[in-house]
C-alpha cells in the first residue's frame, strides 16, 4: 500500500477531507496539522506570543522546534509521498530531507505572495500546484515548472438540504484583517437594512481587543465566530443567496467557497475574475465587477427565484 504524509495548516476541514479522499483511493495516510505563527497557537503559547517583546525570535524558536518534530514523524512513517499544503512553517532543509526518500508535492491554496516564506519552496519540491494562475505565470517567467490546481468541494460536507429560506443574504468567511470584506458587507447591511442578513466569521477577536469585542455593533447580524463546515452547509441551505468575496491576491483563480456554495445547491454572488467566468459562462452564478453591479445582483436575487441557476451551478 502506498503511503502519503500530509502536512497542512489547521484550517477548517481541508486536511481531513484530503485524508479521507486518499484513504478512499487506498492510500495509507498520516496527517499532521500545524498552526501559525507559532505551533501550537493555543493556550499558554497564544498569550505568550501576544505579550512577547520579540515575536519574531519566539516564532523562529518554535519553527525550529517544529522541524525536529515533523522530521521525526516523517522518519517513523517513511512515506512514498509528502503533500505539503502552503507549508509556511517548514524550512527548505526539512523539505530537502523529505526528498531524500519520498516525492514531495507543494499545494498553495492561497496566493504564494500572501506567504512570502513559501515563495522559494518550489525549489525544494518535486511538483508545485497553485490556486492562482498568476502565481503559475510568475514561476513560468522564472523558468520554473508550476501547475494550476484550484480546490473543489468535499461533497460529504457540502450538499443540498431541503430547508426553509430564512436568510435573505448570507456571508460566511474570515473577516478579521479583511478590511475589503468588512467595508463591502457594511455597505450591504446599510443598503438592504429591511432584509434578513447574516454575516458569519470572526472580525473582532476577544484576544485582540476586549473593548472592541464587548461593544461591537450589529450583533444580530455579525456573528463574531467561526463555524464548522456542517454548520456552514446548513446556513447555505437556509439562504436565498450567498456572497463570496475573494482576497485581493486572488486575481485569476477561485477560492474553495466558489465550489462549496455550488455543491450546497445555493445561488451564489461572487466577485468577477476571468477563471470563474469561464467556469460559469451562462449566469449560473452572479458575477460582479464593482459595487453597483453587486447591489443590482442582490436586488435581482431578492425579487426573482434563482433556484434554477443554483441547480445548474450545482
Image (cartoon, grey):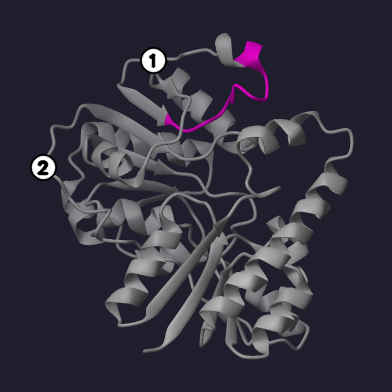
Q: Residues within 10 Å of mark 2 (few under 14, many from 20)?
A: few
Which quadrant: the N terminus? bottom left
- In front of the other: 230 or 186: 230
Identify whether 256 is placed above or below 44. below
Image-based side of 206 in relation to 26, left or right: right
Residue 33 place in picture, x, y as percent: 53, 58
Image-based side of 58 in relation to 285, left or right: right
Report which quarter residue 111 is drawn in. bottom right
Residue with the mark numbered 2: 162
SS state under label 2: loop
- In front of the other: 287 or 35: 35
Q: Residues within 10 Å of mark 1 (few under 14, many from 20)?
A: few
Which quadrant: the C terminus? bottom left
- For residue 311, say whether it is visible: yes
Residue with the mark numbered 1: 220
Q: Residue at x 41, y 74 (%)?
A: 29
Magenta residues (range): 200-212
Identify whether 160 is placed above or below 137. above
Q: Residue at x 41, y 88 (%)?
A: 2
As for residue 118 lying within the magenta part, the answer is no
Q: Residue at x 58, y 67 (%)?
A: 132
As for residue 206 lying within the magenta part, the answer is yes
Amino acid at each position: 500500500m502506498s503511503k502519503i504524509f500530509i502536512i497542512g495548516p489547521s484550517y477548517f476541514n481541508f486536511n481531513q477531507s484530503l485524508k479521507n479522499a486518499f484513504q478512499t483511493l487506498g492510500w495509507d495516510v498520516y496527517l499532521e496539522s500545524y498552526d501559525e505563527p507559532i505551533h501550537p497557537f493555543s493556550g499558554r503559547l497564544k498569550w505568550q506570543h501576544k505579550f512577547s517583546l520579540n515575536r519574531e525570535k519566539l516564532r523562529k524558536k518554535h519553527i525550529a522546534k517544529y522541524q525536529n518534530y515533523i522530521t521525526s514523524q516523517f522518519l517513523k512513517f517513511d512515506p512514498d509521498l509528502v503533500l505539503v499544503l502552503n507549508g509556511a512553517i517548514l524550512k527548505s532543509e526539512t523539505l530537502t530531507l523529505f526528498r531524500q526518500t519520498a516525492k514531495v508535492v507543494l499545494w498553495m491554496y492561497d496566493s504564494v505572495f500572501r506567504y512570502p516564506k513559501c515563495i522559494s519552496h518550489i525549489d525544494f519540491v518535486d511538483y508545485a500546484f497553485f490556486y492562482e494562475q498568476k502565481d503559475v505565470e510568475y514561476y513560468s517567467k522564472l523558468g520554473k515548472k508550476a501547475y494550476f490546481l484550484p480546490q473543489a468541494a468535499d461533497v460529504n460536507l457540502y450538499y443540498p438540504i431541503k430547508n426553509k429560506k430564512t436568510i435573505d443574504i448570507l456571508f460566511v468567511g474570515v473577516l478579521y484583517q479583511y478590511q475589503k470584506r468588512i467595508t463591502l458587507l457594511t455597505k450591504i447591511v446599510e443598503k438592504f437594512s429591511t432584509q434578513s442578513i447574516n454575516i458569519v466569521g470572526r472580525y473582532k477577536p476577544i484576544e485582540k481587543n476586549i473593548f472592541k469585542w464587548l461593544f461591537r455593533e450589529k450583533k444580530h447580524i455579525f456573528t463574531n465566530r467561526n463555524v464548522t463546515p456542517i454548520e456552514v452547509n446548513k446556513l447555505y441551505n437556509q439562504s436565498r443567496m450567498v456572497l463570496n468575496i475573494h482576497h485581493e491576491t486572488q486575481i485569476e483563480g477561485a477560492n474553495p467557497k466558489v465550489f462549496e456554495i455550488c455543491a450546497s445547491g445555493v445561488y451564489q454572488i461572487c466577485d468577477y475574475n476571468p477563471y470563474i467566468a469561464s467556469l460559469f459562462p451562462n449566469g449560473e452564478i452572479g458575477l460582479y465587477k464593482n459595487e453597483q453591479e453587486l447591489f443590482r445582483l442582490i436586488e435581482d436575487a431578492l425579487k426573482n427565484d434563482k433556484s434554477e441557476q443554483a441547480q445548474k451551478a450545482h
